[in-house]
Image (cartoon, helix red, strand yellow):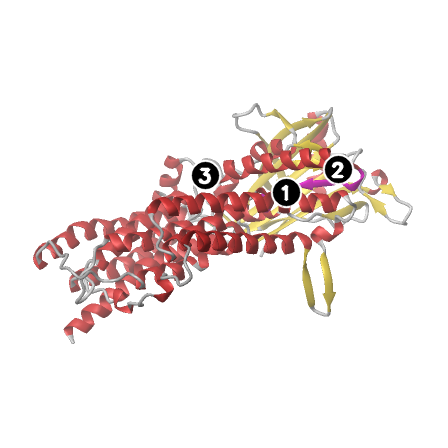
Amino acid sequence: MKQKIRAGLGIFSLMSLWSLLLYQLATVWQINDQYAHGFIVPFLCLFLIIKVQPEDAKLNKFLHTQKNLLCYLIGIPLLLSLLPLWLIREANSDWRLINLVLYGSVLLLSLVCFSFIQNKDYSLKKFLFPLLFFIVAIPWPLATDLKLTQWLQEKVSTMIVDCLLLLEHEAILEGTVIDIGVFGKVGVDQACSGINGLQASLVVSLFLGAYYSFSLIHRFLLVLGGLLIALFFNLARAFCLSFVKVKGKGHYIDNSLLSVGDFSIPNLHDLVGFIETSLIFIFILLLARLSKGGLFLTTLGTSKSNWGNLYVCPPLPFSVMAIFFVISTVVGTELHFTSKEKNMLSQPKLQLALDNSEILIKENLISRQIDAQLHYEEATSYQCQDRFRAIYNPYGFYEINHNDEYWQAFVAHWDLGGACAAVLSTHSPASCLPLTGLTQISPPVGDDPILLPLEVDNRKILFEVYEFYKNQSKLFVFRCFWPHKLEPSEPNLFPSGGYNFEGRIQSAIEGRRNVGGTMIALALANVNSSQIAVSKFQAFAKLHLKLKVP
């Protein structure tokens, strides 16, 4: 009976540790298509773990008392680290470094537990790959992720333009946007950059390398081959979509191909993406199968499954401590932040009300790249213009006149907790708009933007001001972040230092986490004077910005 209790508590302690990590990562897996494969990775890791075979020879080099001592010496510091890690995570849930550090702690604690598998002798080295394989589900550092994505976008868009020009089609590259004349523009977004295919190829090739028991060098070559396959099919996908646009069939890219009642076939963009992913998987599988050779294969699928590998029995006090520390970490962290937030005042919700019959409004489709990177709960994007400036087309309705003064608006909302709104400190106009071919004038690159106070319903709201130009035309951007809660007399400064190490640690100590809020960005085009732009923004905001009490 004592042994069963020890095993039960050991298994439960191991599950509680992994539950922390899975809870932290699940949000990213759900809202970011690039890491959607994360939901299947734990099951693949579990498959690899139960396929680990025990050794014939005795491998335990330590006496039972020595192994227990090592368990406490290694395990207790790791368990103690959970509380500060979870405190920092609660204030910076979007900080990808936390994912790696938390994973490292859980990995080492898991190895400690696997060293106590009952009645079997194992080399812990056999559990390293199944546990390390989980790293493919952990988001890359955001700066690296963004740089690689943007680099791939630039290279893919450049190659597509070259191909279109070789086929004697009109194509001009503007940042990562391809202007194809009368048929409009094609943006090479995150999905078409190839980053999703690269992620998928890593998961498939690493797993198949283990499944077919390849040597280290053969696994490396399989991963390299998988990356090349992913890049090829992504380029083919992006070119096909651009070619469809060139042929004047661009409406098929974003609109459903066929609808029958409530059932709709996905649009061409999503359908081709599904085909691309399927082809990547099939070709990597064929590459692995041909590399293995032979008619009758011995794979992990044909080997015995050892569910007893999960029957971990660390010392009873250690299991109890692990469970206690996990529960205390979650409860203590919540108490820390709620005690700090009790003095904060709930703010009325900031809204953009475009319900004026004198203006023309057009809702825009938000790109998948923005959707994946900003991690908001809800967002809308508009173009609007005074009706007297709009174009009256031959079909009997008005269109936005992009050669005259018009507004672009983007509104996004974040709830309490979840993805931290500090992500906006990296996704600023200064980092995003130059990718579309705009050049920044003000503030100078690297400097903080000017803050413009605006009075909305007797409350002062601070807006950041940016100025850009392109082709002799200027674009002025005004944006603010209005949190759901503020301390008395605290200004609504835009999240800054979101990726500053000291700022993140300080926010955890001070109990400042993402309390949710609204970001509003308003861009005014075709106005050449900053003074005129500011006055027009103030007039526009007076009419359309409102504070609504929940």
Task: Please indicate whether residue 116 sits to the left or right of residue 173 in the image.
Answer: left
Picture mark count = 3
Residue 323 sits inside the magenta stretch: no
Kindly report which numbered mark, 1 or 3, lies closer to the viewer in this rendering.
3
Residue matched to label 2: 180
Observer-nearest of 6 and 526: 6
Label 3 crowd bin: few (<14), some (14–19), many (20+), radius 10 Å: many
Disc 1 is placed on an element classified as strand
Disc 2 is placed on an element classified as loop
User: Where residue 86 sits in the image (x, y, percent)?
Assistant: 34, 50
The magenta stretch is 182-191
> Which numbered disc, 3 or 2, marks the residue that appears first in the sequence?
2
Dots 1, 2 in contact, CB < 8 A: no
Q: Residue furthest bottom?
A: 1
Residue matched to label 1: 456
User: Where residue 499 sits in the image (x, y, percent)?
Assistant: 44, 37
